[in-house]
Amino acid sequence: MLRKKVNFKVTAALIILVLMCSISATALARCTTVVVGKKASADGSIYIGRNEDYAGNWAKNLKLNPAHKFDEEKIIVSENGFEWKLPEKTFQYMSVEDANPDLGRFQEVAINTEQLGVSATNSASQNKKAAAADPLVKTGVGENIITTVLAKEAADAREAVKLVGKMVENQGAAECFALAVADPGEAWIIEVGGGHHWAAARVPDNKYLILANALRIGEVDLNDQENYLGSADLIEFAKKHELYDYKNEPFNFAKAYGTAEDYKEYNYRRVWGGINYFTSSLNPDPEAKNYPLFVKPDQKIKLSEIMSFLRYHYQESEYDPLKNGVDQRAPGTLKTIESHVVQLRDNLPNPIAGITWLAMSSPLGSVYIPYYSGIDQIPAAYTAADSHYDSKSAYWAFRELTNLAYSHNQLKLDYVRGEWQDFEEYQFKIQAKIEKLALNLYYQNPELGIDFLTEYSNDRALKALHTAYQMRDQIKTDFSQILLKDYN
């Protein structure tokens, strides 16, 4: 009996680890996005946050991409055959991308030196009528290259929106997807609904947006180009092909081109979760399926609250999959392979104002580190991952810690979360002081300010990695003691 008891514990832990790290690499990416307008945030920043959900062993790396000046025409090519001519000069930018390039770059999030932030690869789908009328283009633009082009070429959010439109209209789209783009002044959500049709809506300054894996833009007023952009024939095409009942209802992009008429619980529950989290006063119906695209929060949203939402698994509700074991898709999930919150501000120079707060692996067991957009170096451990476990890789360190915490027991999960909460709160506490010092140095000499922020970001990254190793070793030690106790 004792042997069986020991074997059951070991086997259970191993099964969980294997399942979490061996999901098919061909599975579709399923992500949750939150965008917060500058008057909806507590500090006046614009925020773009997203969980990238995919196979547990599809590792990620943080990368610095240099600016280029081309003497000859430069064509960038994606794995599906899409080609795009780059401008003579491109911007330097920081990105998070696939360690395995077999399917493409997949630079999930990026921020360039102009303080343009991009968060992409939020997969969506067409309805059957739209797919027949506006089929996807095999060699069109796709999620694997869209962020790369925008970060290299676009100086602001509106330019990025128009650039997406140009790619889709001229060369077609290889898939349906959504992405968020923002600069210190405004944020936009862009959705591609077919081979040559797209729509974009500006996020109101005093509201936020929650996006799951379905098209959500409804109203599109192309006469109001301050707030809406899209394909020139977006509505006429939908009328011609009877993608909506134009005689009896107004045009709705998500209904005409997407799957809003057959909105799955997998998606609408996460939108409900976001509204329930930030605007509980509305008491949103968890079965309503169609929710407002933009919502005003009950209170202005803090950075820490965006991170908490990305860890949200419907705590204190019947839908909590971790506590209640129910089959629900929550924003906070073990399937996340990286999570980010891009912070954009207009009160500081770009190298100091823009920050990518990045958590490698699932934020449920990982920590957000601030990487300032102006830094010129990244610790090697954060650039060294591939699809095989590597004890020297930051991605794998946080992945392993998350796996161990969740496969062991609630006490270990609480232990990890508590450590990371203290770590993040310290960063929030000193952020203003760090930026004041950086600003003083920057005004003396920009290189001094950038060197200071590089040292700070790298220090936080390496301390987080060291803390992850310490917690991992402690959990392994405790686990071994329990097994020995059971054996004796």
Image: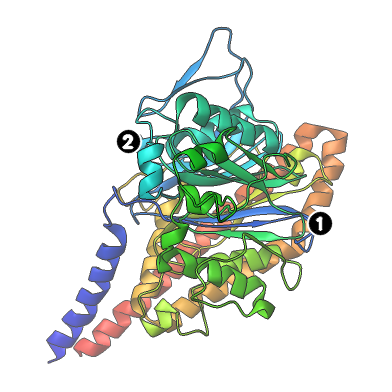
Q: Residue at x 58, y 12 (%)?
A: 70
Q: Secondary structure at mark 2?
A: helix
**Which residue was labeled with disc 2?**
102
Residue 236 place in picture, x, y as percent: 55, 37
Question: In front here: 220 or 239?
Answer: 239
280 left or right of 361? right
Q: Amino acid at mark 2?
A: Asp
Quarter of the image where one finds residue 228: top right
Q: Is residue 289 above or below residue 178?
A: below
Residue 433 marker: 1
Residue 433 place in picture, x, y as percent: 81, 56
Q: Is residue 163 visible?
A: yes
Q: Secondary structure at mark 1?
A: helix
Q: Which class describes the residues within 10 Å of circle 2: few (<14), some (14-19), or many (20+)? A: few
Residue 189 place in picture, x, y as percent: 61, 47
Tag in front: 1 or 2 = 2
Residue 390 place in picture, x, y as percent: 34, 50
Quick one: which residue is furthest to the top in this view? 72
Question: In front here: 440 or 269?
Answer: 269
Q: Which class describes the residues within 10 Å of circle 1: few (<14), some (14-19), or many (20+)? A: few
